[in-house]
Amino acid sequence: MTTIKYRDWELVVDKALTKQTYEKVEIGGVESCTCNDCKNFANNRENIYPQEIKELLTSLGIDYRKECEVWHYCKDELGRHCYSGWFHFKGHFKGKSLSAPTLDTTTTYDLTPITETFSLGFLYDTSLTFFQDKENLVQVEFDAKTNWTIDEKESE
């Protein structure tokens, strides 16, 4: 297990198992979808993730090009397209935890802003994971805003 300090969190990760799991994944959630929102996200991926987040995910053994899930949820007042999504790593963490919204509430995650267009947080969850063993999984939640850059019909 490797301990990584990132901002106010202490992340303890089985990097070898996490990396091995992501290496077995042929395509992530975005590439497995044919909708224009996912095509736009994939086209912008390199600009969506700040360099420090790419480095963090790599240090956790996560391939940032293989999101478990991504979805478009709105277009903001500045015309940017807003997405949420997540990854997983095997391990645990210390620091602020997100509480997962439930079906009967309108609770949203309280993510930590990293840049003006990218926020991040951690919680224990196993939604749509690539891992076969769902014990000791940390879900890395993110929220991102990006422009529309493909020649396909734009979402409203």
Image (spheres, helix red, strand yellow):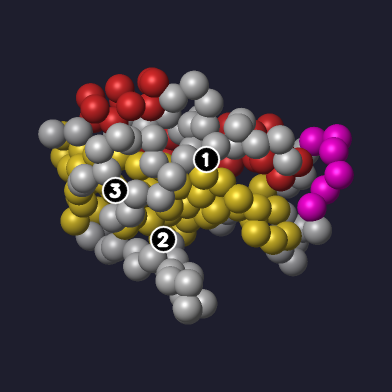
Residue 126: image tag: none
Whichever of callouts 2 and 3 sits on the residue coming sooner in the sequence is 2
What SS does tag 3 mark?
strand
| Quarter of the picture holding the C terminus | bottom right
Q: Categorize mark 3 by other alpha carbons within 10 Å: few (<14), some (14-19), many (20+).
A: many
| Quarter of the picture holding the N terminus | top left
Q: Which residue is drawn at 76% across and 41% down?
A: 36
Q: Categorize mark 2 by other alpha carbons within 10 Å: few (<14), some (14-19), many (20+).
A: some
Q: Residue at x 49, y 38 (%)?
A: 67
- The answer to whether marks 1 and 2 mark residues whose Cβ atoms lie closer than 8 Å is no
- The answer to whether marks 3 and 1 mark residues whose Cβ atoms lie closer than 8 Å is no
Residue 49: image tag: 1
Residue under numbered circle 2: 112
- Residue type (three-letter) at the residue carrying disc 1: Tyr
- Residue type (three-letter) at the residue carrying disc 2: Thr
- Residue type (three-letter) at the residue carrying disc 3: Val
Q: Is residue 139 left or right of residue 66?
A: left
